[in-house]
Amino acid sequence: MKEYWTSLASLLGVLAFCQSIVSSIFPPELRYAILKLTGRLFSLFSSYVYFDITEIDGVNTNELYNAVQLYLSSSVSISGTRLSLTRAVNSSAVTFGLANNDSIADSFNGAAVLWEHVVTQRHSQTFSWRPLPDEKRGFTLRIRKNDKSLILDSYLDYIMERAAEIRRKNQDRLLYTNSRGGSLDARGHPWESVPFKHPSTFETLAMDPAKKLEIMRDLRDFAEGQEFYQRTGRAWKRGYLLYGPPGTGKSSMIAAMANFLGYDIYDLELTEVHNNSELRKLLMKTSSKSIIVIEDIDCSINLGNRKKSCSNGGKRGGSSSFYEAAAAEMRGGGGAAGDESGNSITLSGLLNFTDGLWSCCGSERIFVFTTNHVEKLDPALLRSGRMDMHIFMSYCSFPALKILLKNYLGVQEPNAAGVWNEIEAVIDKAEMTPADVSEVLIKNRRDKDKAVAELLEILKVRAATRGGIGRHYETVEEEQEKRAVEESKEGEAADEFSGEQSEEEEEEDDKKKIK
């Protein structure tokens, strides 16, 4: 045993002697050059290449580091064995992450990559205007040399997009409204916001399932259609018009759309906007992936049907009065909320807001207008490109009633025999809105049989009182909406014809004066 320790001490002495000789013969600069050359030779014959992504780039935060951390959280939560948990501000979700000095494998288009989370202590604190953390954090990416172009060109961009999507899903959605009188908040923004917590979804929405499926498919095609809109040269936006009687679920539909897509909502109050310029500034301050809502557009400002307002005059008088109204609208006098309120938004300003050049200042935006009287709107607002999809929100139908019974009572079918057939026979004639039906069910939700019996009684009474008049609201509304759209197409031809008539009459008057 003694001989073992003696030989070990001798070996250590020899190594120390050799190290002192090497240090005296080879200066530090030469040793550093040799190590650097060795590293280059190793990398030359190695099939891998390494990239370091540090948390702090100089004094600024590296956005790529944050993106990689979020991206890996979606994979680490499944395959990781040692995880770190974080929760961001204004977020309702817990995010998983790699623990210190842990690694995880990933793949992209057939290329294998390895991520390692490197954490080391910072030895010295250099002078900086912003104090640096005690630990140096970063990710090391190892890939094959043959995959270098694929990773740098596509993989990192894919990570940034996925991280933005994860961040948006984890973050609470917001409901914005424009400040009163166009004032700015403390940050200089014209929008004020609160967390959006509306629970409405397409699953709970009282509407015909086939129509809901059509709307959901249209929304999904829009959200996934970036490449399509770029290829066709169209602005990445879409307009929806929700019209129908009050209480039919137009606001719930907007909330369901926002929850389905994960978008923020901008509730635009037109009566608080003074002019077209202010309207454009509000649009510029909205974010992408958002729904811009103007509720009760027929009541917000005077944007009535110009054709109808000028239809009472004669052929010449009607034509001239229409052009006078159009000229007044272009000057700012038409389409305003009234001189007393000081609102001078014009129809052309609103049209440019939804379909003009200023509507393209952002991407992935949805415009939603609601109204109880579609026939009061100017046909120019209803054409495709502004309101692309028109959705009629009707009275409560039998399929919608099934959804309400499931939501409020948790029943698929009434217990009493024959009640289901009776309800189906009178529901269309009763003209009850989903809001009215919901109130009956909420009031009697503790007694399911009583709720169904009272609802059936109310439906019978309303069907009997309205049966003599005849309920064709949906047909009438759809016909009025079609007429309004057709007027926008026929308006140009009518204006041209009336203009030619007025010119012929003026020529005849001139001939009479000459005679």
Image: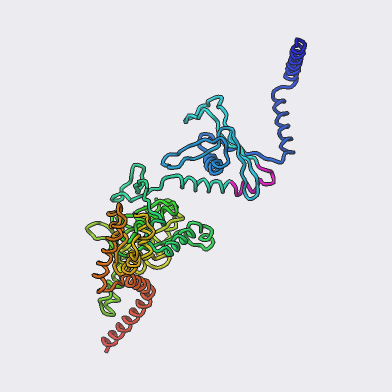
Residue 17, above or below 396: above
Dividing the picture into quadrants, the one containing residue 490 is bottom left
- Count the marks: how many? 0
- Residue plotted at (51% across, 37% down): 61
Using the image as rendered, state which of residue 384 and residue 510 is in the foreground.
384
Using the image as rendered, state which of residue 467 and residue 361 is in the foreground.
467
Residue 513, above or below 133: below
Residue 191, above or below 39: below
Color scheme of the displayed model: rainbow
Q: Quadrant of the N terminus?
A: top right
Tell whether 477 sits left or right of 134: left
**Is residue 351 visible to the viewer in this orientation of the structure?**
no
Dividing the picture into quadrants, the one containing residue 20 is top right
Q: Quadrant of the C terminus?
A: bottom left
Q: Position of residue 498 (x, y in %)?
A: 33, 79
Q: Residue furthest left?
A: 340
Dividing the picture into quadrants, the one containing residue 106 is top right
Verify whether residue 82 appears in magenta: no
- Residue plotted at (27% across, 54% down): 443
Magenta highlight: main SS: helix
Q: Position of residue 252 (x, y in %)?
A: 35, 56
Verify whether residue 147 appears in magenta: yes
Using the image as rendered, state which of residue 119 and residue 507 is in the foreground.
119
Q: Position of residue 137 (x, y in %)?
A: 55, 33
- Residue plotted at (71% across, 25% down): 31
Tell whether 385 sits left or right of 305: right
* Span colored in magenta: 143-155
Tell whether 188 sits left or right of 237: left
Q: Position of residue 129 (x, y in %)?
A: 47, 30
